[in-house]
Amino acid sequence: MAPPRTPKLLLTACSLMLAAACGVQAPEKGAAALAADAPAQGLAATHAEGDLAFGAPHRFATGVTISVSAPKSFRPSTSAYPQSPRAVAFGIEVTNAGDGTYRLSGLSVTGEVDGESSSVKQVVDAVQGYNGIADAGKDVAPGRSVHLNLAFAVPDKPVKLRLQVRPSPAEPVAAKYCGKV
């Protein structure tokens, strides 16, 4: 009598599902795809597949719309953390056009410089008004908006910065904003 194959089949099936889950990404939805010379009409030209220009709004399936302003370069104060020779600041507008209350504590903003995600850290500089997501416990009612000011440490030289914004950790789609700073 041959040994049962169930453990091998189960192990193989689990391995394949794990490999597929880790390596396959769903296509990004909602990114504007206009020619670079097209006039701005509430949408922005993309820099790469799925990247939005700073200032372009992105509406998620939940009804939450996020817009990230153009970057503003500044020199962090001596009390800023972490210390950096230069930082860039962004205004982030979060509008809840959905049916339910949006919890601001779910907002995730991460960045990468020249393709390296480990190189970007959020700067907290209370002297200059960059306190991170200070109202993280705040709920945003339907039809309301919240404005945040966030800053990130960047090298002293011009670099390509990509910010990824998600309204919640469970959101499969990230709005990706990209540009030279």
Image (cartoon, helix red, strand yellow):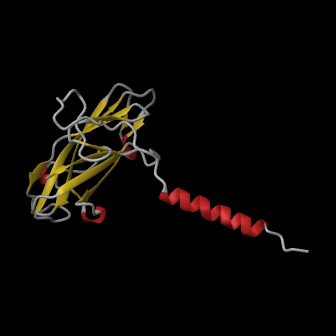
Residue at 38%, 29% in the rendered image: 141
Task: Give above or below for 6 relative to 129.
Answer: below
Residue 115 percent location from the top left of the image: 27, 60
Q: In which quarter of the image is residue 124?
A: bottom left
* 170 left or right of 65 in image: right
For the residue pair 19 and 56, the one nearer the viewer reads as 19
**Percent x, y of residue 117:** 30, 61
Q: In which quarter of the image is the N terminus?
A: bottom right
Q: Nearer the viewer, residue 4 or 63?
A: 4
Spot occupied by residue 122 in the image (x, y as percentages of width and height)? 24, 57
Front-most of residues 96 and 10: 10
Q: Would residue 26 appear left or right of 112 to someone viewing this image? A: right
Whether residue 60 sits left or right of residue 46 in the image: it is right
Q: How many marks?
A: 0
The residue depicted at 46 percent of the width and 51 percent of the height is 25
Q: Where is residue 167 in the image (x, y as percent from the top left)?
A: 38, 42
Is 130 rendered above or below residue 96? below
Task: Place residue 2 in its image quadrant.
Answer: bottom right
Residue lying at the far right of the rendered structure: 1
The quadrant holding residue 145 is: top left
